Structure formats: C-alpha cells, structure tokens
Amino acid sequence: MADNEYLQTVIVLSGGLSHERDVSLRSGRRVSQALRSRGIEVVESDVDSTLLARLAGLNGSVVFPLLHGEAGEDGALREVFELLGVPFVGSVGSACRVAFDKSIATTVVRAGGIRTPTQVALPHETFRELGAPVLVDALGDQIGFPMMIKPSRCGSALGCSKVTRPAELPAAMVGAYAYGSVAVIEEFVTGTEVTVAVVDRGNGPIALPAVEIRPESGVYDYAARYTAGATRFLCPAEVSSEVANGCADVALRVHAILGLRDLSRTDLIVTPGGDAVFLEVNVAPGMTETSAVPLAIETAGWSLGKMSADLVRAAAARGGHDRTIQLAAR
Amino acid sequence: MSQTSPPEPDEPLLERLRQTDTRLDHYVDRYAARAHGMTASAIRALFAVANRPEVVSLAGGMPNITDLPLDVVGSVLNDLVLNDGRRAMQYGSGQGEPAIREAICDVMRLENISAHPDDVMVSVGSQQGLDLLTRIFCNPGDVVLCEAPSYVGALGVFRSYQCEVVHVAMDEQGLNPSALADALRALRRAGRTVKFLYTIPNHHNPAGVTQSLDRRLELLQLCERADLLVVEDNPYGLLGFDGEPIPALRSFDEHHVIYLGSFSKTFAPGFRVGWVLAPHAVREKLVLAQEAATLCPPVFSQFAVAAYLANHDWRGQIKVFREMYRERRDAMITGLTSHMPAGTTWTYPEGGFFVWLTLPPGIDSHAMLPRAVTARVAYVPGTAFYADGFGSRHMRLSYCFPTPERIIEGTRRLGEVLEYEASMLEIFGTGVESESGRLALGPREAPGPNQA
C-alpha cells in the first residue's frame, strides 16, 4: 500500500516554548521531510494560540508531536488532543506525565522489577528547610560519589552534571534547578551507554537494535548530542547477543509498564556484569540529524519515512471523534 | 545506468544486522584547527525560545527599522532598477563603487574624519571588514587586544583566525590607558606579537560606555608611542542621544588608526554595506583580499544605499532613529531602577543599543539563563563577551528592539529571576561556581544576527 493512501494531512508539531525548542524544531523538520519523501502531505506547525484553529481547519488530519521538554513530553498538550478527539502519534497524556518526570518514572519502573540507580528527588525548598550543608553530606553518604544531578523534568542532558566530590555538588544543584524546581540525585552507574527504541505500528511493540553511544569527550552532554562528529554511535551495540536481548527486553518492559504507545526510547547503562540499568525514557525521542532513533531505524533496514508513515497510519486507524472539530472551531 | 535500491521490508530486519559505526560526520577528522570548537551550545539554543513573542528578548542586537520610510526606500529602489539596473546588477570593483565611497566620506565627516574615497574599501557589513583586516594582519597565535568585555562578533573573527585575545580593562570612560600600557608591557616582555588594538569608542557593545575626548587623546598618544595599530569600530557613533558626536579616533591619527564603519544601524542592516578606511598600503591589500573573498562587495546594495543617501534626508532619518532609541534607553533605565535587586549596577548609555549589568556577587548570569527563559525574559550572559571564560557576573541587555512597555516588563521579569537566584545562593552559598573553571565558549554563546 502506498504510504499516502488513506492518509490525510499530517500536522508535525515542533518548537514550543521549552528549553528544547531548538532541538524540537530540528526533529520536526527531519520527520516532515521523511514523511514528504513518502508522498504524504505535511503541515509543520509551532504550538501557539493559532494551533487549535489550524487543527479545526484540517479536519481528519493526524498530529505527529515532536515537542521535546515540558508541554511536549509532560502530556499536557496530548491531553488536549485527547479531549478534542484529534488522532495523534505517541503516548497518551497520562502515561507521558509519569514517563517524563524522572523521579516518578524511575520509581514506577523500579517497582516493575527493573534495575534503576539509587535515586533521590528533591525540590529546592527541601534544601532550604533542612539546610544545604547537612543535606549535601547526607547525599554524599547515601548515594556516594560520583553521582549524577539532573533536573527531574527536562531532556537533552540540559542541567545535568556528574559530581565527583562534595564541593561540586552545590553548583550542580543550582545548575539543575535552573531548569526546574525538582532535581534528582542519582548514583552514577559505570558501564556502556546504550539506548533502545521501541516502535509499535499497530501489531505490537518491537525493540529496534540498541544504539551504543560513545561521546568523544566522555560525556554525552548537549554539545556531544547535537554536534555531528562529537559522538560515535554503534548500532547494534557492541555487546553480546544475550546482553542485547536483555536491553531489548528492558526497553519493551519499560514501554509496557508505563503504558506507552507507538514510540519510546529507553536510555540504559550496561554494567560490566552485563546488567541493563534504566536511566530514563523518552516519549518524544529526538529525531534530529544526530539522534539515535533514526540511526536504529536505518540499521534495521527501514527508513525514517516508512516508520513515521506507519506510525501515522496506526494513529489514523485509532482515529479521533467528531467532537474534535466542533470544539476547536468554536 | 539507473540504480534501484532494494525494496524496503515491511518488518524491520532484526536478524543478521550489519553494524553501523558512525560519528554522523564523514569529514570529522578533516576539519582545520580553526573549526575546532564550532560546536552546538545549549545557551545558544535557548535564544531560539527568545524569538517567541511570549518572551521579552533583551538579548539580540537587531536594529529597529520600524521607522524607516518604506515608501521612500521603495521608490528609490524602483528608480534605481529602472534607470541604472544594468550597472547595479553587474559585477563591480573589489574596492567598492565610487559613488558610495564618496558618500561614505560625507558620512564620516560628521565625526570629523577627513578622508579620500580612494582610501575607503566597501565591505559586506563592517563585520567583513574586520574579517579581512584580521586575515591580512594576523597569524595563528598573534595577540589582539580587546576591551573587557568586547563585541562578540569581533571575538568570533579573532577566534576563527586563531588569534589570542587579551582583554584590557575599561572604566566609565571606556578603555583604561594604564591597563593598556600594563598589558602591552607584559606581552612584550613575554615576547608576544601584538598585532592591533580593537576598540569600540562610541556607545560600546556590550558595555554601553563612550570614550571621552581626553581619553581618546590619551589612548592615541600611548598607541603612537608603542607603535600599536588601532582598529576603531564605530557602528553607533551617530546614534548618540546628547550633543554632537565626539570626534573619531581616526580623525586625530590617519597612520595608526584603521576605521570600520557601517550603514547597518544608521540605515538598514539587510543591505550589508560597511566599510574600512585604511592607509594606502593596507587598503591595497584589503582590496586584493576582498577580491579573493567575494570578487566584489554586493553591487546592488551599494547602489541602493548610495541612492538612498542621495535622495532621502538620511541625517533627519538618523535623528528619528536616535529619538526612538533614546525613548527605549529611558524605559530600560526606568525599569532597571524599579526592578533590580540591591547590589546590581548598570552602565548609563548615552547612545547605541546596550546596557551592561553587573550582578550581586555569586550570581552567575550564564547558569541563570534557563530560569530567565522560563520566566519569559532573555539576555546575553556576560561570558559571551570574553574570550577567556570570564564575565559570568555580568549580562548585556539590549533596548533597541522591544517597545518601551515591553522593556519595562522585561526588567520586571528579570528582577524576579534575580531575586529567585539570590534565594538559591542563600541556600547553597555564594561562589558556587568558579569563573576560571568555565570553558571559554564566548563567541558561540550569543544570539544569531536575526534574533531579536
């Protein structure tokens, strides 16, 4: 079947007001190009006060959200689409809300029997109430060094730092709180960094081959993620088939435990002993020129265009309902 | 012969995969050393958010051309195409067209510069003039002296030619002569080659200060004694709010000063017409370098600017711009006075686009930017204006583009962010981040030219 058969216009959403706007615009452009290469009509749209009217004017179209960061991945916008009955690619709002927040997702995934780093989530008020020096000492004792500090609700490694000694911790906390009011403090897990995409085109979720990430600088930070050449990617990862299967299994279980839909990407560390440790999951994984998911798709012998078109078709088949346009048109 | 790729499988091939091993850039090991450090930046990416209308951007440096009479410009361009289109759309001279070079001399006369059109070379904005100057003067490792802080675009040029920038302190009258003398002594003692001093005497970007007449004379004396070449960058000289412009450095010394000028702020930046006024020998080399770089600067733009200058009251237009910027400067100062927390200080610009803020000790403008963007206000962290990683206690605020009401609202938001930041410092202690620990990413961490 041709990709454009039975498909209405696809509205690729990117941009928004999050700190990851720039990355989102890149993801949006790439997916739009990929869909167009399959003969599908695409409207690229930012998220602003004209969006709902635009949706109303494109009756029956499918939304492909490529918004990273808050509003895109925290489920808020998706809840609006659900309310309006607009078919969209990706997980529902409630699942995103859980998955996007590292402190909540880690707890839920751990409860599902998956190994996660020891983690504490702390709003900055807690440091004020209890006193930073005492808390910093306690974190050092309980989590140990090195540790990872991350904003609880942010992507692209923004605000993340590795802390190797107590003196570095306050600056790292301030850096994380610059991106949100809650930070997670995690045990630093040493091992091989891999990421596994899970896709479901309507016949059940499958894991794509794991992508191994080797940043030249040793740290997969913002520059390593978005500067072509700064990171070496190996797909499938250079791990035994047993470990590869273990990674795929963890990614599929994370996808299921969190109730995710269509597409997710789970970031893992493979320990020297071969265990896959969950770091975080993305409900709107990056699709930029330097992102891992398109690489995994291509290694699997697919194209980004085909996978995107399949996801859109699955979303269209799920459909929306007529309330959509009535509400939006008001 | 046509090639057909194998059909894409309906299911992904998860068995017997061929491994992909890639850095996503086939040429990654072939770039010149000067391309190292051209990396993505989280700070620069934040300016993409600043362009959204919800955000009050005090970050960009885009001239405000709302008041430009488009009907006049339109009719000038219409006549140009009809009457002179075949010349205006043809290749031109590497040095630039005679008519615009003559007009440029008229413009420079307003700042007491007496020059001959033969000594002017037109460039693609003064930015390209600086690029060509650096190209013909600087070898990798040569030292360029700059104010502390300095224009981010200039630092980018010096970096791309692998120069070492040494910053020289400023005070409320601009570049400090004794600091300059100290720097020269230290560098010469260390056996370093200092190629020139780069300075912005008027309404400095980003510091917002202007060199007094006495200061100019003192600096020139010093440079003459030291046989130090001065590159005077003067994009804002005619945008002073009070009184007549102070004579340019070049007006006192035609041998030691190379002058960079621009129509970007006095007319419109889109034409990309700037110029270099240089002694004969330098100018000859610049023209050859210009021919190598572009064959000739954009001819149509030169004709357009020359026709605008000939047919429109451009001096009156500059007055209109000045009043518009003065109103915005006043709004900025009013907003800062109302909303900045204790311990914050700022410069008082008498022209140009920018105010330079100094924050209370311990507050880091670089680390704070994401929080400011969340609060829907943007600025440029001071670190962008230093080649050595310093500047985190400062920020540049621009008042050129937003309306006065938006400027005041921006300062209100900024005030809240600073209060919040101060409370974070209270929790975690001052001096949580050491300036010297930061990589010198300066020139990569400022908004692009098309960002408000």
Image (tube, coloured by chain):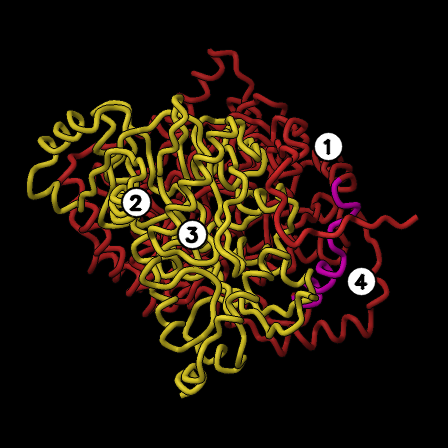
Chain colours: A yellow, B red
- Chain assignment, label 3: A
| In this rendering, the label closer to the viewer, 4 or 1 | 4
Q: Are marks 1 and 3 in contact (CB under 8 Å)?
A: no
Residue denoted by label 3: A20
Q: Amino acid at mark 2?
A: Val
Q: Can residue B215 be spotted in the picture? A: no
Task: Tell me the SS state at disc 2.
Answer: helix
The disc label shown at residue B88, or none: 4
Residue denoted by label 2: A109
Mark 3, Cα crowd under 10 Å, few <14 / some 14-19 / many 20+, is many
Residue denoted by label 1: B281
Q: Amino acid at mark 3?
A: Glu
All told, the count of numbered labels is 4
Q: Are marks 2 and 3 in contact (CB under 8 Å)?
A: no
Q: Locate the N terminus of chain A by quadrant.
A: bottom right
What range is drawn magenta here?
Answer: B293-308
Q: Amino acid at mark 4?
A: Ala
What residue is at 76 percent from the left and 57 percent from the top? Answer: B299
Q: Are marks 2 and 3 in one subunit?
A: yes
Mark 1, Cα crowd under 10 Å, few <14 / some 14-19 / many 20+, is few
* Relative height, residue A330 to residue B218 (above, below): below
* Relative height, residue A330 to residue B436 (above, below): below
Among the 4 quarters of the image, the one containing residue B178 = top left
| In this rendering, the label closer to the viewer, 4 or 3 | 3
Q: Amino acid at mark 1?
A: Ala
Q: Main secondary structure of the magenta part?
A: helix
Q: Is residue A198 left or right of residue A307?
A: left
Task: Tell me the SS state at disc 1.
Answer: helix
Q: Are marks 1 and 3 in one subunit?
A: no
Task: Tell me the SS state at disc 3.
Answer: loop
Image position, residue A182 (x, y; %): 22, 47
| In this rendering, the label closer to the viewer, 2 or 3 | 2
